[in-house]
Image: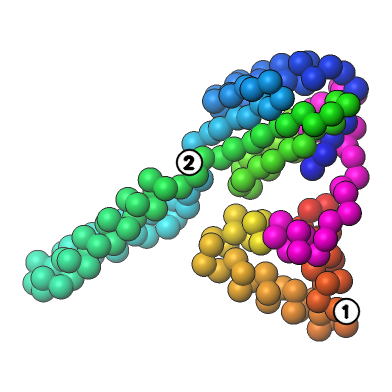
Amino acid sequence: MRIKSNVAKNEIFIDFERYFSTREWNIMLTPNTISAEDGKNYSITLLLLNTMLVFILSIIGIIKLEFLLLGILFGILGATYYIVSEKHRVKLICLENNVFETYTNSNLSREMLEKFISFLEKNGKITRLKPLGLFVKDIYEKLNEFYIDIWGPHLARKMLTKDIERLMKRRGVSREEAIKKLFEKCFK
């Protein structure tokens, strides 16, 4: 998303720092970029299910060695999943003429950024810019990233394809039009 600032870049950066640091996010600043990071982006449900599976397999593993080894394997996979999970991240990049580009990598970071932008809009410090015309390929990639946040990396493409095909059947539109409609629906 792009925003245009009505005040100096430093004032936006100060507001960004105040907003996210009061929520205990770590702030990083470079000359034209400010970013904030929070805890890891992982599914607590998945980790709990994995822990229960490891526990059950370990109990059964007392009787059969194969189950114990399978429990150890799932334990290692769960630990690896937690370790490689990315942190929630919000990034604000100053391009030129007080125009900023925003980036997020999770639903939580998207919500936090939306609240921050609404706060700045209320104070009259920024205005939202209309999105630039994107190619269908770029729109599809943004949708895919959005679906990965929701469904995870394994189901994302399948669910995205399913939703696109459903729109194509319901509305009788081309694949490109269905992708654009779905993008509008997801990123209003």
The reply, left or right, for residue 59 in relation to residue 88 is: left
Which residue is depicted at the point 71% across and 16% down? 14
Work out whether residue 82 or residue 55 is closer to the camera in this orientation and state it: 82
Q: CA distance from mark 1 to mark 2?
A: 39 Å
**Which residue is found at the position 68% from the left and 20% from the top?**
31
- The residue type indicated by label 2 comes to Lys
Q: For this rendering, which residue is in front, 97 or 52? A: 97
- The correct choice, above or below, for 32 with respect to 129 in the image is above
Q: Position of residue 154 (x, y in %)?
A: 52, 67
Residue 129 locus on image (x, y percent): 90, 40
Determine the image quadrant of residue 71: bottom left
Answer yes or no: is residue 121 visible.
Answer: no
Q: Is residue 110 visible?
A: yes
Bounds of the magenta span?
117-142
Question: Mark 1 falls on what kind of element?
Answer: loop
- Residue hosting label 2: 40
**Are there few (<14), some (14-19), or many (20+) residues within 10 Å of tag 1?**
some
Dot 2 alpha-carbon crowd within 10 angstroms: few under 14, some 14 to 19, many 20 or more: some
Q: Which residue is mark 1?
A: 173
